[in-house]
Amino acid sequence: MSRADLWALAGIVGVEIGREAANHDVDTGIGPLPIDFKGGRKDCPTSPYTTEMHEFPSAHMGSNQTYKYFADNFGLSMYDTVALMGAHTLGRAKKEHTGFEGTWTVSGRKIFHFDATYHHNMVVPDYGWNITNIGTDEDPKYVWKCTDLAKPETMDRDCGIMLDTDIGMLLDLTVDEKGKPTCEFFTLDQRTCKMMNWDQVYSYENFFFEDANHKFAMDFSRAFDKVISKF
């Protein structure tokens, strides 16, 4: 097995572990994912080291830039990309690795759950989003911080983060040359950004319902299979 094959297999196993963890706490309705592992990838001669430069997606891309990246590099449609980004329901961003800090879903065991929480958080009416630069003026790192407005101010109201590329799955987001959004989004009713992909995101919205989780999982599986099968 090549190193490239191992990374592809690790991705499949990671999602399966997340699915099982979610079902352990609540019946999400997500069964085994229809992602087939296919071997045959070839490592470069100097693997695991290389001096080649590869393009990685910027966290500060607007909607159209994000969709173009995944279309050009993996042949994904807009629909595929919205589903694939749901992988952010797992794990967290760490400042020492990316310059960003936080979880896309609430901390604790939830960051190990593979379900539709990522998309759900975007459309909760009581969630407020504030754009914050946690970097510097020279190297800005814009983060959308979530506040649960339904909770009293005396309680922990943190409900995660989103990056520009995440918010761009729901809204028609454009950014300036430093990655700062050019429109505003606080709640669904308080925004200057136009909606984009509302029907798809909302179809995943209620992660308490088995059909929403199942639909997300099937859409994600198809998109993820395209990504790891492109070699």
Image (tube, grey):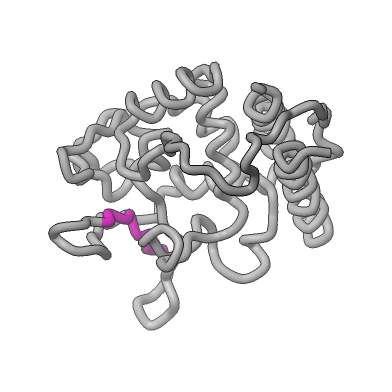
Q: Quadrant of the N terminus?
A: top right
Q: Which residues are magenta?
A: 141-150
Q: Quadrant of the C terminus?
A: top right
Q: Residue at x 42, y 37 (%)?
A: 53
Quarter of the rendering containing residue 100: bottom left
Indicate whether 25 appears above or below 79: below
Q: Is residue 159 visible?
A: no
Indicate whether 176 appears above or below 215: below
On the image, the x and y values in percent for residue 139 come to 21, 57
Q: Residue at x 35, y 77 (%)?
A: 153
Identify the main secondary structure in magenta: strand
Q: Is residue 137 magenta?
A: no
Q: Is residue 118 left or right of residue 214?
A: left
The residue positioned farthest toward the bottom in the image shown: 154
Choose between 10 and 121: the one closer to the eye: 10
Q: Residue at x 44, y 45 (%)?
A: 122
On the image, the x and y values in percent for residue 101 come to 41, 65
Indicate whether 199 appears above or below 160: above
Q: Is residue 26 visible?
A: yes
